[in-house]
Image: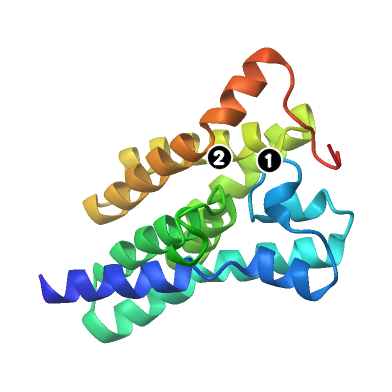
Amino acid sequence: MVPALLSILLGYLLGSVPFGLILNRLSGGPDLRSIGSGSIGATNVLRTGNKGIALLTVLLDGLKGAVAGWIALSLFGAPMQFVAAAAALFGHCFPVWLRFRGGKGVATFFGSLFGLVWPLGLVAAATWLLVAFTTRYSSAAGLSAAAFTTAVSLLFYPLPVKLMLLAMTALIVFRHKDNILRLKSGTESKIGSKS
């Protein structure tokens, strides 16, 4: 019980660091919460036109889950890396420092997969690229990647991986509820749009 609680705390605190908000502010950009979707993630950073900061945000947000998982694994052993990674995603989506208003979790999801279960990371990346290329909707790509990767995990991976993916996907769907409504109504912003 103690290793699990410590893994959750570790993951949550690492996940809750708002890299997109910090980097955009340091670069002289606007408050991300006042533009686009209001999210602190890389897609919203991209709406400011600063591609370099957006890329750095993707990398750092992705490392949250991977690093949390690696630390938990080294301290507490398997399967605590999956617990910590899921907690990091929760921290990214609901950071205590920002009144629990964070990002959508897709970059942290990808980072967790590539860091802990890299074949699933490749599945997620391929799915994201396919959907993003054909629709130009980042939200649709992220949702599709999470759903399809979870389905693959249910077929081929052990229980700890399945539980991590199920928890992450449920959270990503919840955080994208407004995007889903906009996708249905045809008002969702496309990749590269500043609106």
- Which residue is painted at 22% across and 50% down in the image? 159
In the figure, is residue 150 to the left or right of 187?
left
Q: Are marks 2 and 1 in contact (CB under 8 Å)?
A: no
Q: Residue furthest top?
A: 185
Provide residue 48's location: percent of width, then percent of height.
85, 53
Give above or below for 90 relative to 36: below
What colour-coding does the image apply? rainbow
Q: Nearer the viewer, residue 43 or 71?
A: 43
Which amino acid type corresponds to the residue marked 1 in the rendered image? Answer: Ser
Residue 124 percent coordinates (x, y): 56, 46
The disc, 2 or 1, on the residue closer to the chain's N-terminal end is: 1
Residue pointed to by mark 1: 37
Identify which amino acid the numbered label 2 is placed on: Ala
> How many residues crowd mark 1 within 10 Å: few (<14), some (14–19), many (20+)?
some
What is the x, y in percent for residue 170?
38, 38
Position of residue 162 relative to residue 78, above or below, is above
Seen at 85% across and 42% down, the residue is 192
Where the N terminus falls, by quadrant? bottom left
Q: Residue furthest bottom?
A: 75
User: Distance from label 2 to label 1 (Cα)?
Assistant: 20 Å
Q: Residue furthest left?
A: 1
Front-most of residues 8 and 165:
8
Q: Is residue 153 above or below residue 108?
A: above
Q: Secondary structure at mark 2?
A: helix
Q: Residues within 10 Å of mark 2 (few under 14, many from 20)?
A: many
| Residue at x 83%, y 37% (from the top left corner) | 195
Residue hosting label 2? 145
